Image (cartoon, rainbow, N blue to C red):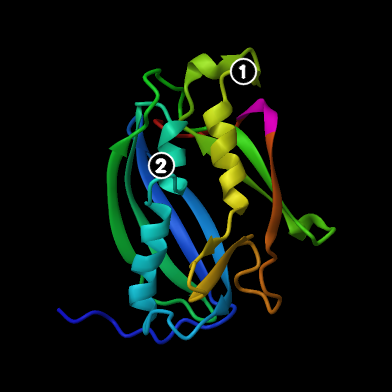
């Protein structure tokens, strides 16, 4: 089957990277966005191939996937990542297998118990701030209702990588992390300029009224 033709990557393209995992019989998703700030003459000829280029960077030694697994419990199983152009128009995604469990030997709580990582931009308003809830961290890292700073070094390393640019040494492209909340608006998503790990353990309460009745 021939690969889809999605067109040449262009400045201000927004690429969505959606990670899927299984944790305690529940599906977990983590979604990141990158904005193409610059392109050079040697960039991939089609976005379908550029998806593979992005995945190669994420999955490289010392890359984001390696850092994600380094802070994840062995209870969580990352299945795949889907990479998709979502702006200027949404195109078909391309799926890349991961099929790896977390590196940490300790177990973890349910998916709604997470570390909150605040992502900030230069825009001074609520639209300029986002939060990633990172589940699957070892229970042993918790000290009451807070994360033990002495144990969470790998999680902090992962958090700090959330504002790392994905660039080509030869100048073919510059991909910059951005917030995804404004994908459908007229204003382009803002670049992420800093990240911060919140010390409190975040528990997200879900509505369960009526379930099982």
Report whether residue 48 is seen: yes
Identify which residue, 150 or 181, lies in the foreground: 150
Sequence-wise first label, 1 or 2: 2
Residue at 57% over, 47% down? 161
Residue at 29% over, 39% down? 100
Numbered circles on residues, count:
2
Quarter containing the C terminus: top left
Quarter containing the N terminus: bottom left
Judged from the image, the secondary structure of the residue bearing numbered disc 1 is loop
Horizontal side of 13 relative to 126 (left or right) equals left
Judged from the image, the secondary structure of the residue bearing numbered disc 2 is helix
Residue at 38% over, 79% down? 44
Instruction: Indicate the position of residue 20 as horizontal and vertical percent values.
Output: 37, 48
Instruction: Calculate the distance from the C-alpha at mark 1 to the C-alpha at mark 2.
Output: 21 Å
Above or below for 6 versus 17: below
Horizontal side of 133 relative to 80 (left or right) equals right
Q: Mark 1: few, some, or many residues within 10 Å (few <14, many ≥20)?
A: few
Q: Is residue 143 magenta?
A: no
Which residue matches tag 2?
66
Which residue matches tag 1?
150
Q: Is residue 201 magenta?
A: yes
Q: Main secondary structure of the magenta part?
A: strand
Residue at the farthest left position = 1
Q: Bounds of the magenta span?
A: 198-202
Report whether residue 205 is seen: no
């Amino acid at each position: 089957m021939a690969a889809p033709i999605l067109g040449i990557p262009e400045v201000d393209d927004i690429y969505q990277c959606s990670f899927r995992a299984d944790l305690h019989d529940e599906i977990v998703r983590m979604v990141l966005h990158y904005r193409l700030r610059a392109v050079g003459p040697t960039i991939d000829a089609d976005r379908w191939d550029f998806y593979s280029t992005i995945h190669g960077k994420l999955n490289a030694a010392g890359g984001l996937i390696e850092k994600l697994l380094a802070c994840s419990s062995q209870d969580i199983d990352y299945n795949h990542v889907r990479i998709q152009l979502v702006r200027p128009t949404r195109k078909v995604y391309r799926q890349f297998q991961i099929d790896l469990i977390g590196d940490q030997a300790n177990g973890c709580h349910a998916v709604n118990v997470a570390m909150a990582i605040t992502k900030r931009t230069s825009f001074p308003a609520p639209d300029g701030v986002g939060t990633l809830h990172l589940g699957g961290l070892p229970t042993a890292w918790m000290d009451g209702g807070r994360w033990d700073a002495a144990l969470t070094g790998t999680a902090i390393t992962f958090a700090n990588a959330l504002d790392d640019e994905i660039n080509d040494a030869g100048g073919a492209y510059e991909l910059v992390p951005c917030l995804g909340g404004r994908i459908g608006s007229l204003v382009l998503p803002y670049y992420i300029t800093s990240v911060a790990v919140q010390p409190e353990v975040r528990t997200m309460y879900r509505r369960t009224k009526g379930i099982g009745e």
